[in-house]
Amino acid sequence: MRPSESGFFEEEGWREQSSTFTDIAEMNADGGQWCRLMKARRYGKWFILKTLRAEYKDQPRYLALLKKEFEIAHQMDHPNIVQTLAIEQVPDVGLCIVQGYIEGRTLRQAIDEERWTAKRVTDVMEQTADALAYIHARQTVHRDLKPENIMLTTNGDRVKLIDFGLSDADDYSALKQPAGTLRYAAPEQIAGVEQLDARADIYSLGVILNELADRLPPYDRPHFRRIARRCTRTDRERRPSSVKEIRWQNRHRAIHWSLVALAAIIALVFMLRTNRPTTLTQPQRDTIVERVEVPQASEIRQEEIPSIPQPVQPSESTPSPKPSQGQQPASPTSFALTVYNAAFARYKNAIAEMRHQASATGADSATLSSSTIRRIVDESLDAAISEINQTTTDEAERYTLQRQASAAINKAQIDFRRDTTQWKAFCEAAAGK
């Protein structure tokens, strides 16, 4: 290492890179009717040199066409257009347009060899349309739009529009010869109409889109076919006047999937509402209790009750008996009797606790307050609803069991207020004693 004049260290043997082109090699790519393309290195980077073929080198007309191409392309500064850097004499080659090197392949190669999806077609067409919109805004028509003149970069599949050899602009009054590739040229272009506009490029874009649609699955083709038909109408007055008028996104497909997603959300909400545990507001509870007729003890027959629970003795806490997990109650009447037992036991526990407190304080008697009674009703109903939700998912059956449970809780309250002896009579009659 040795210090340079600038003060930085340089490697021994380092030399300033030459400004001349080296490693010049002709490319297989098509440079047009009168041009050829070469790859060359300068400053450690690769460039493309576009020059006239040997038979046209000394003809003023073709030299003028090469200069015209440079003047048009050099004005273009867009991420989807090849960068044109300079025009200069290169030793042993001649007058050359110097362009940035693109690592990639042509759209023609991609169409023939690669897999395509609707999203990829949309991305490529949108980028190509952006490049055309930029060109058309500068009163320039490409006039030779085809898959061979659209490059796709290896990194990112970015579009690069190339070859402005046949392009024309309003600024040029000369060198306006008919041009284009027959398969992609618009009818007015083939007919030799001098005043071509953006619609000629839009026609070529439609032909390219048709080729891309052929590479798609059948269900993705109709949307792009419709766009291609609009772009390739014979009468240019019926074509889009600008590429900005073309909607590449399939709105019908987007709406379809939006509706599918909305339907799925609605179905999910409905399922959650259907399967969630049933809860009742206080007015709903009161309404159910009021309108349900309480079954009389004499109406309960032994054969309707496979298993008669015994009266629950007062204890610290008396939860409602739970049916076996995943099984339904033997019958609504049997379930109502179970709820009745639990509710009545809660009343007995509450009054026993009240009497114990009265005895401790020396009071003569103890009675249940209305708030205590309401609490017992709510606890009993909540416990019954929880058991119902664990036992069955059928909404109609849930409602029937809720009615029976509400009636049983209401009867337990009435019986306890009247006389505790009715509790014994109810159980004995239900058991057939």
Image (spheres, rainbow, N blue to C red):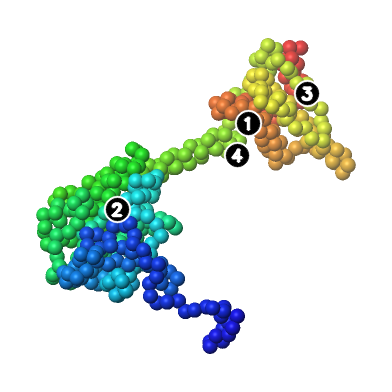
Q: Quadrant of the N terminus?
A: bottom right
Amino acid type assigned to the residue bearing label 3 in the image: Pro
- Marks 2/1 in contact by CB < 8 Å: the verdict is no
Q: Is residue 330 above or below residue 102?
A: above
Mark 1, residue position = 389
Residue located 44% across and 58% down the image: 155
Marked residue nearer the N-terminal end (4 or 3): 4
The disc placed on residue 282 is 4
Amino acid type assigned to the residue bearing label 2 in the image: Pro
Q: Is residue 57 above or below residue 303?
A: below
For label 4, count other residues whose C-alpha is less than 10 Å away and answer few (under 14), some (14-19) or many (20+).
few
Mark 3, residue position = 311
- The mark closer to the camera, 3 or 2, is 2
Alpha carbons under labels 3 and 2: distance apart: 90 Å
Residue located 18% across and 61% down the image: 197
Residue 411, image quadrant: top right
Q: Is residue 289 above or below residue 230?
A: above
Mark 2, residue position = 147
Helix, strand or loop for disc 3: loop
Amino acid type assigned to the residue bearing label 4 in the image: Gln
- Marks 1/4 in contact by CB < 8 Å: the verdict is no
| Image x and y of residue 36, in percent | 28, 62
Alpha carbons under labels 4 and 3: distance apart: 28 Å
Marked residue nearer the N-terminal end (1 or 3): 3
Of the pair 21 and 423, the residue shown nearer to us: 21
